[in-house]
């Protein structure tokens, strides 16, 4: 398996992969592929990596800038998707580690996401009690600071997420 930056010819394949990956997820809203498409169209994909094996796309991770209490420097991770036939085989973990390595190298303040605390704790994410997203339960709002401080305040994802 190889992880690399997405190519411009792969946008349709990434959308199909993302739709397929989230089709049976209980937490999915069916908008994940459209979120990635809107982020890409807005030029807001800080990191967009694919996992491939023998020419087949197996997974994708998107990262985009977020605002925390009006401040910049943080990144939002997601959606991250793996084709259902290969989920729980390490592809998502590899994508996550590659994305986090790129973000650490970029010297951003840290990464936030909305997700399962048990899964993302493995990567160092933790609940950030002072971080809020309107309409999202606080226990699934997670942060991985690259410095000593956890972010506090209202978290705003890119408008592509449709949370405004």
Image: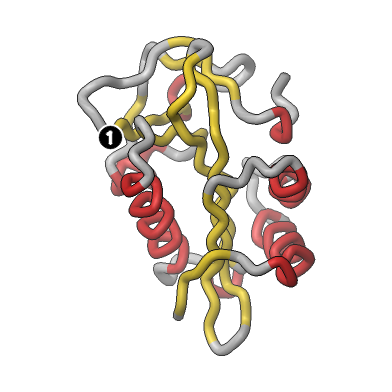
| Residue 67 in the figure: left or right of residue 8 | left
Graded by Cα atoms within 10 Å as few (under 14), some (14 to 19) or many (20 or more), the crowding at tag 1 reads: some
Residue at left offset 62%, top offset 82%: 56
* The quarter of the displayed image where residue 156 is located: top right
In the picture of the structure, the residue carrying the numbered disc 1 is 146
Q: Nearer the viewer, residue 71 or 62?
A: 71
Residue 113 placed where, x, y %? 48, 35
Q: Is residue 101 above or below residue 139?
A: below
Image quadrant where one finds the N terminus: bottom left
Q: Nearer the viewer, residue 116 or 35?
A: 35
Residue 76 placed where, x, y %? 51, 36
Residue at left offset 71%, top offset 69%: 10
Residue at left offset 46%, top offset 77%: 2
**For the residue labelled by badge 1, is the local secondary structure a helix, a strand or a loop?**
loop
Residue found at the very far bottom of the displayed protein: 54
| Residue 91 in the figure: left or right of residue 151 | right
Residue 125 placed where, x, y %? 33, 37
Image quadrant where one finds the C terminus: top right
| Residue 29 in the figure: left or right of residue 122 | right
Residue 6 placed where, x, y %? 60, 65
């Amino acid at each position: 398996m190889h992880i690399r930056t997405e190519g411009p010819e792969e946008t349709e394949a990434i959308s199909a992969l993302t739709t397929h990956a989230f089709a049976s997820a209980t937490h999915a809203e069916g908008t994940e592929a459209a979120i990635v498409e809107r982020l890409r169209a807005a030029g807001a994909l800080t990191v967009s990596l694919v996992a491939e094996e023998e020419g087949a796309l197996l997974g994708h991770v998107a990262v985009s800038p977020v605002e925390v209490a009006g401040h910049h420097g943080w990144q939002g991770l997601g959606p991250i998707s793996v084709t259902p036939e290969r989920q729980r085989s390490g592809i998502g973990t590899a994508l996550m580690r590659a994305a986090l390595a790129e973000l650490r190298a970029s010297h951003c303040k840290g990464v936030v996401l909305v997700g399962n605390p048990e899964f993302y704790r493995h990567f160092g994410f933790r609940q950030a009690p002072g971080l809020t997203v309107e309409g999202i339960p606080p226990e699934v709002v997670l942060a991985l600071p690259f410095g000593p401080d956890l972010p506090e305040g209202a978290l705003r994802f890119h408008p592509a997420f449709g949370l405004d």
